[in-house]
Image: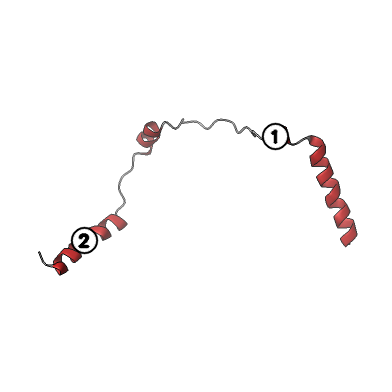
Amino acid sequence: MGRGRQKAKHTKVARELKYSTPNTNLSALERELGVPSSEPDYEDKWAHLVSDDDELDDDEDDTEDDARTA
């Protein structure tokens, strides 16, 4: 097979791969990957590092900045 015909064949195959939409069985993929079907509740693993006092101090700083700019 000549180089031109070979390149045309590769181009055709590449185009088919690029624009094809294969049927994907998502439930089988989830089973294969071991993903649980229901999402667990979100738990902030860093919450213990921030105290409630720090959050209040940040809010007070914002109001002071707003008073200075007004």
Question: CB atoms at circles 2 and 1 under 8 Å apart?
Answer: no
Q: Which residue is mark 2?
A: 10
Please name the residue shown 14% across and 66% down the image: 5
Element type at marker 2?
A: helix
Q: Quadrant of the C terminus?
A: bottom right
Relative vertical location of residue 20 with respect to residue 26 in this rendering, above or below: below
Camera-side residue of 51 and 15: 51
Left or right: where 21 falls relative to 33:
left
Query: Tag 1's secondary structure?
Result: helix
- Pointer 2: residues within 10 angstroms few (<14), some, or many (20+)? few
Q: Residues within 10 Å of mark 1 (few under 14, many from 20)?
A: few
Q: What's the residue at 80%, 40% (across, down)?
A: 54
Type of the residue with mark 1: Ala
Q: Front-most of 35 and 53? A: 53
Furthest-left residue in view?
Answer: 1
Closer to the N terminus: mark 2 or mark 1?
A: 2
Question: What color scheme is it?
Answer: secondary structure
Q: How many marks?
A: 2
Say above or below: 31 vs 65: above
* The image quarter in which residue 43 lies: top right
Alpha-carbon span between mark 2 and mark 1: 54 Å
Name the spot of residue 3 as percent of width and height, x first.
15, 67
Mark 2 belongs to which amino acid? His
Q: Give the numbered dot on residue 47.
A: 1
In the rendered structure, find residue 63 and report the number of the disc placed on it. Answer: none
User: Quadrant of the image for the N terminus?
Assistant: bottom left
Instruction: Say left or right for 26 vs 48.
Output: left
Residue 47 drawn at (x, y percent): 70, 34
Q: Which residue lies at the image location 60% right of the left edge and 33% below the top edge?
A: 42
Residue 25, relative to residue 67: is it above or below? above
